[in-house]
Image (spheres, helix red, strand yellow):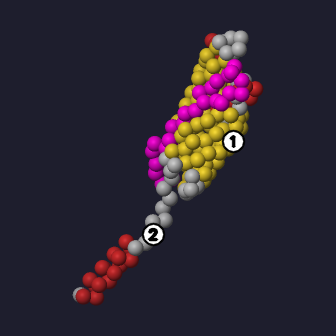
Amino acid sequence: MITVIVLILAGNNLLLGQKDTSYHIMKNSIFIELGGNGAQFGGLVYGTVSIFYDRIVLSSEFMKASVRIGGTIPRHEAYQAFPLLFNVLFGRNNFFFETGLGCELLYVRPNYNIAYGAFTSAIGLRYQNPKGLIARIAITPTIANKNRDPFYYVGALIGISLGYSF
């Protein structure tokens, strides 16, 4: 009986002494994106670089959900884009398959003073390591209707992102 009690106590201490090897992803990220969601419909000319804040709001072992908001860093005052996306990430540890849907406010000033909305999305890969590095590559299809025009404009760019998680 004493042997059984000693083994139980020793086993519990051995289990408690084990290192936690599970991966806890950092929930906040700031990154710069070249191309991508903010560069659609004139952005390649006027503002190809965007800055984003991404927050993981739901997390399980294999799936995470995040909300992303950002805006272009214009090289010219004529074009601004402000994407807002809801994303789902599938994967473990550092590597994720990422999908997202959202909307985008686009503002073009030079001759038109036009503001219009667009539906945007992202499909790609995301690397996020525990030390804070985040890197992404995604295809970003977007559909927009400019100024109540009867035609819809469809575009898809590749976005490449690099940033920091905390």
Q: Is residue 89 left or right of residue 18?
A: right
Q: CA distance from mark 2 to mark 1?
A: 35 Å
Sequence-first tag of 2 and 1: 2
Where residue 35 sits: x, y (%)? Answer: 70, 35
Residue ranking furthest to the right: 45
User: For the residue carrying disc 1, how many other residues have a C-alpha within 10 Å: few (<14), some (14-19), or many (20+)?
Assistant: some
- Which is nearer the eye, 132 or 119? 132
Label 2: state its secondary structure: loop
Which amino acid type is marked by label 2? Lys
Residue topped by disc 2: 19
Which amino acid type is marked by label 1? Ile
Relative to 161, residue 16 above or below: below
- Which is nearer the eye, 154 or 81? 81
- Total numbered labels placed on residues in the image: 2
Residue topped by disc 1: 160
Q: Residue at x 51, y 37 (%)?
A: 67
Q: Residue at x 59, y 23 (%)?
A: 105
Residues drawn in magenta: 55-82
